[in-house]
Amino acid sequence: MPELPEVETVRRGLMPAMQGQRLDAVIPRRPNLRFPLPDGFGQRLTGRTVVDIRRRAKFLMFDLDSPDVLIAHLGMSGSFRLGAKPFPEEKHDHVIFKMSGGGEVHYNDPRRFGFMDLWAAADLASYPMLTKLGPEPLDDDAFNGKALAARLKGRKTSIKVALLDQKV
């Protein structure tokens, strides 16, 4: 399963290929990944521009020039592949993003444990899978030795178990 450092690497790799680019076409090749794709998934994304790509824990959030945010999770085996048009599709390429700059981004997930969702940007703080996450570990202000000590104070568990608890 991709962990936080790998997801951050994916985010950084997607930025040059997608940021500022219009999604000329978004083609879901199946109706579901781990969960069903939202109604009108491809139509709601087609024609939109990717303004920014952020990461929260192991979730990728694609800010768009619309009220929606595309939320993606890689699951156990998900990955994004980048290429120029025409870009050969592989068996497990489940979502194809055709970019205005001439490239393509394919979401590939052999086990289909990853997912994609669309959520209102104004209501992102209430997205169910994001509400119980702890502080962002790569944020020096929210996650430092002092903050960690305060969150662990009074706990009677090993450091490893405490750190695996994403709510700490």
Image: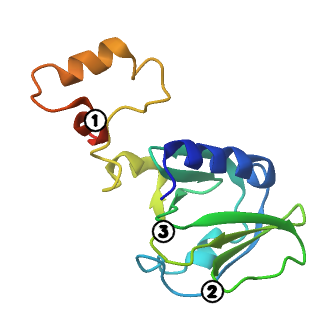
For marks 3 and 1 on the same chain, the one whose residue lies earlier in the sequence: 3
- Say left or right for 35 vs 131: right
Q: Marks 1 and 2, Cα distance to the nearest angstrom?
A: 40 Å
Disc 1: CA contacts within 10 A as few (<14), some (14-19) or many (>=20): few
Q: Which mark is residue 68?
A: none
For marks 2 and 3 on the same chain, the one whose residue lies earlier in the sequence: 2
Name the residue type under label 2.
Answer: Arg
- Say left or right for 161 vs 47: left
Q: Position of residue 12 (x, y in %)?
A: 69, 44
Q: Residue at the spot x=25%, y=16% of the render? A: 149
**Residue placed under numbered mark 2 in the picture:** 29
In this view, the mark in front (1 or 2): 1
Q: Residue at the spot x=22%, y=17% of the render? A: 150
Label 2 element class: loop
Q: Position of residue 122 (x, y in %)?
A: 44, 48
Where residue 125 sits, quadrant-wise, is top left
**Residue placed under numbered mark 1 in the picture:** 160
Classify 83 as above or below 121. below
